[in-house]
Amino acid sequence: MISMRPKTSARDLPPRMLRRERRLKSGKLWVGYYYDGRDEDGKRREIPLGTDLTAAKRRWAELDCVAPPAETGLMREVFDRYEREVTPKKSPRSQSDDNVRLKRLCAVFGNVHIDDITPQHIAIYRDRRGETAPVRANREMALFSHVFNMAREWGLTAHANPCRGIRRNRERPRKNYVDDEVWQAVYAVARGELRDAMDLAYLTGQRPADVLSMRWPDIRDGALEISQAKTGKRLRIIIEGELAAVLERIRARAVSGMTIIATKKGKRLTYCMRRERFNTARLAAIAEAERAGDHALAARISEFQFRDIRPKAASDTDLAHASALLGHTGTTITERVYRRRGEIVKPLK
């Protein structure tokens, strides 16, 4: 029997499994795994096992003629691979959301073997997480389902997705409608670039992220061309009326840069910058209403979120126009989620 010298490095890896690290020109750290084996002549040879630790351990087990280590099927390994290979392909906002949700899921399921997770476990997670954050629980379950499906594609499990058939927590669409008094209270104390963002969000009915992504080169043939990040839907909004006036007002500032919504120095207004400016304006508007003794208005202002502007746009026009402007293929979603004012009807007599 050949005795092996104790490992002096990579002690977290199985015997005869090596880790190699290399700093790439991009600055990213590359990590690869190898099997410390022998060729036909008995000479030492490092056999590549790949860059994925879970897959590398499975390959190592085949070469070493032993059963795969139990930890190769742990969900934390699957979550790590998903974060490395799938999350970077998503939009920046989705990547940020994924990182938060994966961390929470890993805290619960990380040390569980993938084949041991049952639909009942998912249901328990839904109920316990749903006690305080039912909507977030739904998003986390959706992400877990996608992670599990990817694990099936990677050959890490042949079991059925445990999320399949598990009901989600009931979600109630947000009902807050921003009336003109609330709008004007915040608009009056908003900075110039925030007013631009509010106006464009309202007049175009687009999502906050799409508003911040609007560029001057997207204006062609008298229309503002938009490709919605969430759905890929393409729209051409005719530049006329108030929209034309707003764009002309922004141009008159002679701000350099490609994006339409920008600071005085021409810097693109980011999501964090927009959120900070909006929160500041809302707090100032609330304070102004409180000083005037209008506590009811202050309470309504406190409910105003930037994402409420898209539903306001959908509620301030007819259903067909709203559906087309928002980029929906039908009127069902527009009416159920975005229309926040009741229809005007005449009395019976």
Image: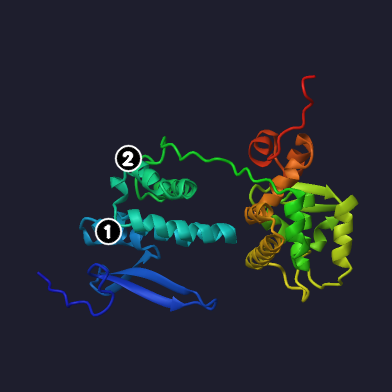
Q: Which residue is located at x 70 percent, y 67 percent?
A: 269
Q: Which residue is located at x 82 percent, y 62 percent?
A: 216
Q: How many marks?
A: 2
Q: CA distance from mark 1 to mark 2?
A: 22 Å
Nearer the observer, 135 or 256: 135
Q: Which mark, residue 156?
A: none
Q: Position of residue 217 (x, y in %)?
A: 82, 61
Q: Position of residue 234 (x, y in %)?
A: 74, 47
Is residue 95 left or right of 9 when viewed as pictured? right
Can you identify the residue that label 2 sits on? 120
> Of all residues shown, which one is farthest toward the top?
349
Q: Position of residue 257 (x, y in %)?
A: 79, 71
Label 1 vs label 2, nearer the camera: 2
Is residue 57 left or right of 217 when viewed as pictured? left
Can you identify the residue that label 1 sits on? 71
Is residue 312 left or right of 170 when viewed as pictured? right
Q: As shown in the figure, which amino acid type bears the numbered disc 1?
A: Glu
Inspect this view and state whether residue 300 appears.
yes
